[in-house]
Image (cartoon, coloured by chain):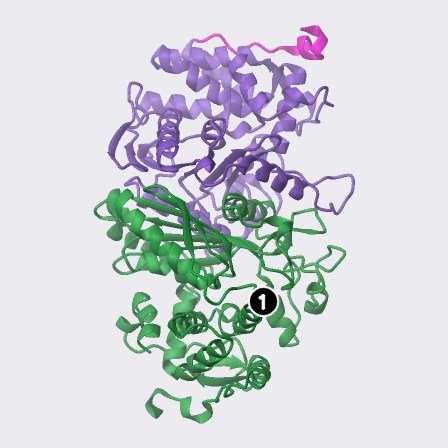
Chain colours: A purple, B green
């Protein structure tokens, strides 16, 4: 699990000694454990079965498993089904490679050629990093792209090279403007990552109060959602995920501020790139989505020699602010994900909800692939390995 | 009023024919009208009196009057007093000019040399535009800067040249992290402006629910503030602006999302630029603030030939989303400001609260400058001019 352990190193869990297991939000009896290698094996088998070249399979499986490893379950194994459907319908192309339409020393306009999002994203962020290393900043926009999954994955790639990475993507319209009752824009995502010597600042957020994945998760687990997450078809806030999912209407975070931030993201990712934008993006999978993304890398070396020390001091100051409840310290963005990584490392396995695993039992049957094998008792403690 | 009318042209009010006067949020009997030229004259007189060279006076007065013209009263005449104090104490230098520390084809690191913010800002955005015109993107960070006032002013300057402009600034720590009870970061601002053929997208927002100016405004007008804007010294939401102003604790817009966005802005503006950041920035005016800013210009010509048409379509789609209340159409960011500009053009005068005018009566006495002359009845209608 070398590739999986890399992010653990980036986030410092390996240098912190023994850590207490972190409680997982799902009750144990509703989740089952799957060995990390087994999850990776299953994803690779499925991708190979639909015809993805073996050279690309490892990169995609790694990307999905790392999302689960970080507790971002909406963008992990959960997404595989959509990717497989898109590949089988031809909405994402098996053999496509992204290509550069035009470029300057600091910018590039990339055509994703409908390759899977992770392939477009890796290509673009690497290009942005290369440009930033020579011009201070690299700004890459991609059109004809696919769902990029966990956006912070790409921002990491810039951060591990000592740069600041920022990634944005547009998405199908599921968010409504304040005082509106129809969705006009996606719950577009923004990720930012930069690392100091001691601290890491890793932000990955949607511009809605909660993303559609959280509502789907509640629906799959037969739970209510809090008021203020999503609205029913009439535009009124609802606690029932089933009503919220009929025609997704998410509330923007911070009212018009979250909405405007999402609009800026769509302006850059969709309007500027030549991809689809706003209500042009199809809500269902009946046609290719043609999403757009922006990848920015920034080399602090061009500005300050002691950026890392200053970043550490900045993060320390945030952490040192006085908590309202002394037992709940102020957390930096990315800290909850690190705690989840510690939890997974403790188990050496990924805790998946049984509903998700049962969905992939059907997928395995459909594709004639060996189903996911559960780890059960083998994972109760680190010693059992 | 040629320079003032320029923004009116940018925002299309001149092509829309006659417009209905827009109700101003302040009751008429608590505001007085001041001719635009008179406001400009007073600002220039004050600046000249404290020793600002006459070559710079026009630029600063224009900048402050345009903020009031757009209804951004917190950053208009209201700010003059702080600027005068800073100039008199030497926290902002009268004769300083910004200089470039280092640059590449697409980036620049600027030292504001403690010049007034508007002078640093104009210099930096013009530099970013120049770089964007040759490299596609221009990214300029400034240190040793001063309060930049209305951030969208600078983004406009990029937009009128056909580019997209983005401006960010850090500020003194007045915002607290969710679940905290001490301020650790500023209510940092973000402005973005881009123009199409028909529509303009002009966003200027703070990352807190409301900025400190709104709380001060409520205090000056003896009004309550809604819960959720600011907290008292114990970290609990309060409706009393007097309690909220004792040790400013603003709530971030959208909880941790607004807080993290503010942190990204501070990372770029403060940590990366070499300026002060987070709790290093002094809350009072007892010492120079050494703020940092980021100015980004992006030339759409490098990416797409039909960007303006696509932008118009994007804005149209947002405006066309179904309003919850049919009598309240969905508004684009910047539309309320355009309505205020129409209102001012209708009056040919700026409506200032009497409390503000009485403060400047004292300033005029202190500086031995002719006080602001009120317009009174002369401004009741357009015909009276």
Look at 77% across and 44% down and name the residue there: A325
Which residue corresponds to mark 1?
B214
> x and y percent of residue A353 in the render?
60, 23
Instruction: Determine whether, in the image, residue A37 is placed left or right of residue B330.
Output: right
Using residue B177 as the reference point, say whether residue B51 is left or right of it: left
On the rendered image, what quadrant is the C terminus of chain B found in?
A: bottom left
Which image quadrant for residue B248? bottom right
Asked whether residue A57 is in view, the answer is yes
**Quarter of the view holding residue A11:** top right
Q: Residue furthest left?
A: B305
Q: Is residue A44 above or below residue B4?
A: above
Q: Quadrant of residue B312?
A: bottom left
B165 up-or-down from B267: above or below? below
Who is closer to the viewer here, A375 or B292? B292
Judging from the image, mark 1 belongs to the subunit labelled: B
Callout 1 secondary element:
helix
User: Which region of the structure is painted magenta?
Assistant: A369-385
Residue A371 vs residue B288, the one in the foreground? B288
* Magenta span includes A371: yes
Q: Position of residue B382 (x, y in %)?
A: 35, 87
**Total marks drawn?**
1
Q: Residues within 10 Å of mark 1 (few under 14, many from 20)?
A: some
Q: Residue furthest right?
A: A326
Comparing B9 with A10, the one in front is: A10
- In the picture, measured across the screen, residue A357 lies left or right of residue B384, that is right
Q: Quadrant of the N terminus of chain B?
A: bottom left
Q: Residue at x 49, y 32 (%)?
A: A152
Residue A28 on image: x %, y %: 69, 22
| Residue A280 falls within the magenta-colored stretch | no
Q: Residue at x 42, y 79 (%)?
A: B40
The image shows residue A277 at horizontal and vertical percentages of 34, 44
């Amino acid at each position: 699990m070398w590739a999986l352990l890399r992010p653990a190193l980036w986030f410092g869990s390996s240098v912190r000694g023994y850590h207490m297991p972190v409680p997982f939000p799902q009750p144990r009896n509703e989740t089952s454990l799957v060995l990390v290698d087994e999850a990776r094996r299953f994803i690779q088998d499925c991708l190979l079965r639909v015809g993805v070249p073996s050279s690309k399979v490892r990169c995609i499986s790694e990307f999905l498993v790392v999302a689960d490893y970080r507790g971002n379950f909406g963008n992990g194994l959960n997404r595989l089904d959509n990717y497989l459907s898109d590949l089988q319908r031809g909405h994402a192309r098996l053999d496509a490679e992204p290509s550069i339409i035009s470029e300057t020393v600091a910018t590039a306009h990339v055509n994703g050629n409908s390759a899977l999002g992770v392939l477009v994203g890796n290509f673009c962020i690497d290009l942005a990093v290369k440009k930033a290393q020579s011009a201070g900043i690299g700004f890459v926009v991609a059109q004809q792209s696919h769902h990029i999954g966990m956006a912070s994955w790409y921002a990491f790639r810039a951060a591990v090279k000592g740069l600041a990475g920022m990634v944005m993507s547009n998405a199908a319209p599921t968010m409504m403007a304040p005082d509106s009752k129809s969705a006009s824009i996606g719950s577009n995502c923004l990720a930012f990552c930069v690392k100091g010597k001691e601290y890491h600042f890793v932000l990955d957020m949607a511009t809605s109060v909660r993303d559609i994945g959280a509502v789907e998760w509640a629906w799959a687990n037969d739970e209510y959602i809090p008021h203020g997450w999503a609205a029913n078809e009439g535009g009124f806030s609802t606690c029932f995920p089933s009503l919220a999912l009929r025609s997704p209407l998410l509330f923007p975070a911070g009212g018009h501020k979250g909405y405007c931030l999402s609009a800026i993201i769509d302006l850059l990712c969709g309007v500027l790139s030549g991809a689809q934008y706003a209500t042009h993006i199809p809500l269902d999978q009946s046609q290719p989505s043609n999403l757009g993304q922006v990848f920015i890398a920034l080399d602090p070396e061009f500005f300050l020699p002691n950026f890392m020390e200053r970043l550490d001091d900045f993060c320390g100051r945030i952490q040192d602010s006085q908590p309202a409840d002394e037992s709940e310290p102020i957390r930096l963005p990315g800290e909850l994900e690190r705690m989840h990584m510690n939890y997974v490392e403790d188990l050496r396995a990924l805790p998946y909800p049984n509903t998700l695993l049962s969905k992939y039992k059907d997928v395995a049957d459909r594709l004639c692939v060996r189903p996911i094998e559960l780890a059960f008792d083998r994972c109760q403690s680190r010693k059992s390995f």
